[in-house]
Image (cartoon, rainbow, N blue to C red):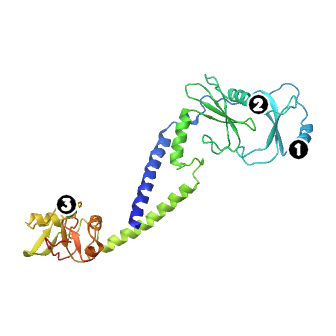
Amino acid sequence: MIAKLHKWAAALVGLQMLIWAGTGLYFNLVDHQRIGGQQYRQSVPAEPGLGPELMDPAALLAAHAPVVRLTLVNLAGQPHYRLEHQRTLYPRQPQSMTLVDAVSGTVTEIDGMHAIALARASYRGPGTPLRPVQLAPYSAELPKEGNPLWRVAFDDDLSTVVFVDAASGRVVAHQNRHSREAAWMLKLHFMDYLGQGGFNHPLMWLFALMSLWLAGTGLVWVGRNLAQGAYRWPWHRPQSLTLIGPKGTQRVRLGRGQTLLDAMTAQGLAVRSECGGGGVCGRCRVQLSESTPIHGAERAHLSPRHLAAGWRLACQQQGERDSAPRVTEGHAP
Ligand code: FES
């Protein structure tokens, strides 16, 4: 059972390691300017330039209390006061804020038309904006954004999409087909298969624990195989084995890397085989000393009782240790 679990866990971890190697290579070789998604982005001044007289914000503070921070911002050329009602560490965290036109004093809601104007102001490509779509927080495209977003797509050659924060009017991100390709690679690299937007998630913890467990069981396995002499070392000398079969006693020389099946066949001792030594048919049964190492194919073909009695497959044995096999052709279990 543990061996089976070890095998499947190793297959899963091995597959993920291949993915890590492939995606790691991708990020090493790819042009990072290209995958940034900023090809058609232009910077927008954060503060408005000189223009009409701005209203005194003191009245706003009283009208929209509580206000923990007031910022004058430029929203597509229109000066606005951004009134934050609670302090957050990052702009991506859910915000409670009010936008007020700094000239007229009216509250501004970021609707689809505003979103297009803000997206356009940050865009310098050849495309025109398509119909904007509103996204709920933590969408698949920007899983870390905790505020509603407007998604404004442009019909350009790179399929650019601009995301605008529907609460603050902030242009959150530009994406295009190159950055989306890189985002997929990052998803694979971070094992972010559930779209959590990072690598610190339960699946990653599970794989880390699985790798630790694999290392532990692997070490135990290696130790057990060493103790059983299951490894074949190049410096082992050829062995000579005594066979006791229906035709009497005979010594068989085993060359380096030669199986008992091959050695017996070469010396005219018939052993049944239907798979030519592939460990598949289970026919080439011989009885050896009980301590003879057991190989995987033998576990598959022989019962625990017969294994304990020393029965093995001649095609799997290479006679590294002293043993006196008794070949009982015709009486194999
Ligand atoms: S020859 Fe078929 S299992 Fe050994």
Quadrant of picture, ligand 1: bottom left
Percent x, y for residue 14? 42, 54
Q: Nearer the viewer, residue 324 or 52?
A: 324
Question: Which residue is under mark 3?
Answer: 277
Q: Is mark 2 within 8 Å of ligand 1?
A: no
Q: Look at 37% across and 71% down and name the residue there.
A: 223
Which element is circle 3 on?
Answer: loop
Is the CB atom of the residue marked by disc 3 within 8 angstroms of ligand 1's nearest atom? yes
The quarter of the picture where residue 138 lies is top right
Depth check: 306 or 47 in front?
A: 306
Local crowd size for mark 2, using a 10 Å CA cut-off: few (<14), some (14–19), many (≥20): many
* Residue on which disc 1 sits: 65
Asked if disc 1 is less than 8 Å from ligand 1, the answer is: no
Tag on residue 75? 2
**Judging from the image, what secondary structure is the residue with disc 2 in?**
strand
Above or below, 249 relative to 215: below
